[in-house]
Amino acid sequence: MYRRLVLKLSGQAIAGPNDFGFDSDRLTHLATEVIALRATGVQVAVVVGGGNVFRGNRAADWGIDRVEADNIGMLGTVINAVLLRGRLVALGADDVRLMTAIPIDSLAEPYIRLRALRHLEKGSIVLLACGNGQPFTTTDYPAVQRAVELGADALLVAKNGTDGVYDADPNKNPAAIRFDHLTYAEVIARHLEVMDQSAFILARDHQLPLHVFDIDRPSAASTIATGAQLGTLIN
């Protein structure tokens, strides 16, 4: 069904049950899911978050400037991406490329769109870190931005413990109803929280389909890649 997909992983996915930090079992699970996704035959890029290391919106708590806080958050995405690359290689992934929006030559390649496309066309798993290199955005926006830039057929929005988009918080309301399919207009009209509004509007404007699903479910991403309905599709 799909030729090229971008998977958005949050830092929380790497932290597992903890608010911050890293969880080895979770890292192995995520790496296994990425490998399984590529095994379906699709080209795979992964945008990695950094909220498990530092969140830019905590600038005031630490008494630092928001720009500096976001810079720290971007470096957090690099830590997570290097961890993920290491685990992917350890599990047998034969060609993993890490590209960063801020040049860190000793660790990764600089993100260059045409180079990223070439890696994808050769079958490499491409990990994308540092967001888009700019402050005042979460990794939602660069996830959509990279998906559009790279001509992805869809963006897989991985959630932790939530298997799609609901009409209410399912953790607080047992009667909450999950949507199998939504249009962009319905998400906006219902004030549903899928991702940052600026990121969602960018996806809408470029008609980028969004698959919102639970990354905790084994083989979820690869199931979506083969065309099966899972989670919530927004288009």
Image (cartoon, helix red, strand yellow):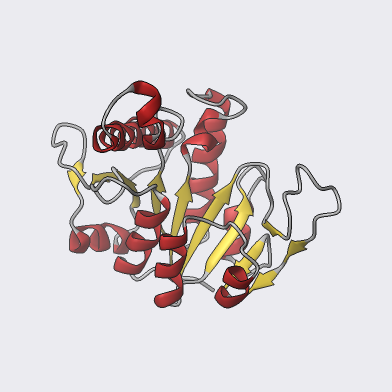
Q: How many numbered discs, if any? A: 0
Residue 182 placed where, x, y %? 64, 72
Residue depicted at x 43% and y 53%:
140
Residue depicted at x 60% and y 69%:
187
Is 74 placed above or below 174 here? above
Relative depth, front residue between 113 and 207: 207
Residue 1: image quadrant is bottom right
Residue 219 placed where, x, y %? 63, 50
Quarter of the figure that contains the C terminus? bottom right
Task: State whether residue 42 appears in this view.
Answer: no
Relative depth, front residue between 24 and 204: 204
Please state if 74 lies on the left or on the right of 211 as rendered. Answer: left
Relative depth, front residue between 18 and 113: 18
Please state if 177 lies on the left or on the right of 20 as rendered. Answer: right
Relative depth, front residue between 101 and 112: 101
Is 218 placed above or below 203 here? above
Please state if 123 lies on the left or on the right of 133 as rendered. Answer: right
Question: Which residue in the rendered view is the most extreme toward the right?
Answer: 175
Residue 185: image quadrant is bottom right
Residue 186 placed where, x, y %? 63, 74
Residue 166: image quadrant is bottom right
Residue 190 placed where, x, y %? 65, 68
Please state if 70 lies on the left or on the right of 234 as rendered. Answer: left
Task: State whether residue 234 appears in this view.
Answer: yes
Residue depicted at x 67% and y 71%:
181
